[in-house]
Image (spheres, rainbow, N blue to C red):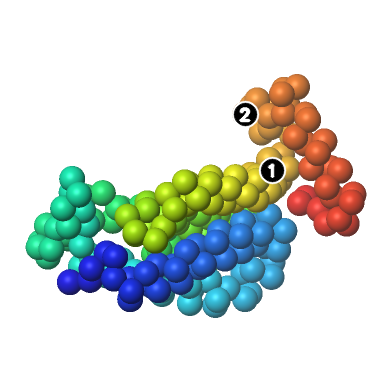
Amino acid sequence: MIRELSRPRLIWDTLILLLIVISSVLVAYQFAFDQAGALEGFQFIYLIDLFFLIDIAFNCVTTYRARGVEILDRKQCTAHYVRRHLGIDVLASVPFDLIAWLLIGNGHLLGGSLVLALRLLRLLRIVRLFVILKRWEAFSWSNPSLLRVIKYFVSILLLIHWLAPASGSIRRLPPGSRRIAGLSRPAFRVPMRCLNTFDRCTGRSLR
């Protein structure tokens, strides 16, 4: 069994946190700005996936706390992880985009790449970030208040970053589809104007 507050687990969780941030930024950037290049050079994404698949195996044998008591029984720990976190971790770690690429090639979704749209499932890894930070709050040396601030700060930054692929999907929709979806209403005009301003300032376009 892997003790949840052991040094090896702490080192591994730190690595996983870094990979969560890297993959979240990279996947959103590829979907919004670099679809053609991302389809040709995506090996690094799958290398990161390998670490998260290993993390699933580690999580099945990692202890947890129930009412302040550390549970050391392997069956209970596995059942607890399967019941609470396995589903999301599988969706966020299994390379469904690669499976789709091998089976049907690259289709299209919302005017963009189906493969890259499936790659967005990796953004669910943010849930793992919250789980790790919550675990760290149990460390005697940790500052729970500081960890909460870090958690909310990172969440806000990632949310802002994820608005790019969402806006890109809207921009790639045909005008008729935007009207059907209600995206031509006044409430959506301000975000679209901001996106146009971003395109002019950076010289990059999501069209």
Q: Viewer-proximal residue, 113 or 67?
A: 67
Query: Looking at the image, which residue sits at the far top?
Result: 186
Taking the spot 37% from the left edge, 58% from the top edge, the residue there is 136
Q: Viewer-proximal residue, 151 or 197?
A: 151
Which mark sits nearer the N-terminus, 1 or 2?
1
Helix, strand or loop at label 1? It is helix
Tell me where residue 91 sits by quadrant: bottom left
User: What x and y, as percent, mark residue 11?
Assistant: 40, 74
User: What x and y, as percent, mark residue 130?
Assistant: 42, 51
Tally of numbered tags: 2
Q: Along the horizontal axis of the image, is 135 left or right of 65? A: right
Q: Along the horizontal axis of the image, is 27 left or right of 122? A: right
Q: Is residue 103 above or below residue 8?
A: above
- Amino acid type indicated by mark 2: Ala
Helix, strand or loop at label 2? It is helix
Neighbour tally class for label 1: few under 14, some 14-19, many 20 plus, Cα within 10 Å: some
- Amino acid type indicated by mark 1: Ser
Q: Viewer-proximal residue, 197 or 1?
A: 1
Res 80 visible? no
Q: Quadrant of the N terminus?
A: bottom left
Tag 2 residue: 181
Taking the spot 22% from the left edge, 57% from the top edge, the residue there is 64
Res 161 visible? yes
Tag 1 residue: 167
Taking the spot 65% from the left edge, 25% from the top edge, the residue there is 182
Neighbour tally class for label 2: few under 14, some 14-19, many 20 plus, Cα within 10 Å: few
User: What x and y, as percent, mark residue 7?
Assistant: 33, 74
Badge nearest the viewer, 1 or 2: 1
Taking the spot 79% from the left edge, 42% from the top edge, the residue there is 195
Q: Alpha-carbon distance for marks 1 and 2?
A: 14 Å
Q: Are marks 1 and 2 in contact (CB under 8 Å)?
A: no
